[in-house]
Image (cartoon, rainbow, N blue to C red):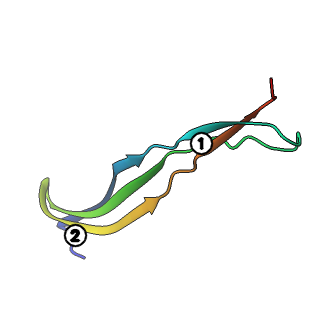
Amino acid sequence: LYPAYRYELYSKVVEVKEAKSEVLPKISGEEKDIHPKNGLISEGYLCVYEGEKLIEKRKIRRDEYNALDGVFYVEKQ
């Protein structure tokens, strides 16, 4: 590492995976709702600057998180 260089980590979300939801009738009364949560794909980069000039951008990671689909239980009508 040289003092003339500056290193920064940068990350970004490249895709959002939309969660789905389903509504089902309660059967036993013990069912618990599951709230949906979107998933995503993100990437991380190491950026190297000389002064204010970007001289290198290297991808160092790619992470994928699956969506959690939701289920909501309602009383039978």
Q: Is residue 66 above or below residue 17?
A: below
Crowdedness of circle 1 by 10 Å Cα count: few (<14), some, many (20+)? some
- Residue occupying the far front of the picture: 77
Give the CA separation, mark 2 to mark 1: 47 Å
Q: In this view, does 35 lie above or below 40?
A: above
The circle on residue 36 is 1
Q: Residue at x 57, y 50 (%)?
A: 68
Circles 2 and 1: CB atoms closer than 8 Å: no
Q: Residue at x 89, y 43 (%)?
A: 28
**In the image shown, does 2 or 69 lie closer to the viewer?**
69
Residue wearing tag 2: 3
Horizontally, residue 26 falls left or right of residue 10, namely: right
**In the image shown, does 25 or 36 lie closer to the viewer?**
25
- Quadrant in the rendering for residue 50: bottom left
**In the image shown, does 77 or 21 lie closer to the viewer?**
77
Q: Which residue is drawn at 62% across and 43% down?
A: 70
Q: Position of residue 12 (x, y in %)?
A: 33, 51
Q: In this view, does 15 lie above or below 43?
A: above
Q: Position of residue 65 (x, y in %)?
A: 48, 58
Horizontally, residue 56 falls left or right of residue 10, namely: left
Which secondary structure, mark 2?
A: loop
Horizontally, residue 69 falls left or right of residue 55, namely: right
Crowdedness of circle 2 by 10 Å Cα count: few (<14), some, many (20+)? few
Q: Is residue 50 above or below residue 18?
A: below
Give the mark count: 2
Which secondary structure, mark 1?
A: loop
Check disc 2 and give the amino acid type. Answer: Pro
Horizontally, residue 52 falls left or right of residue 30, namely: left
The N terminus, quarter of image? bottom left
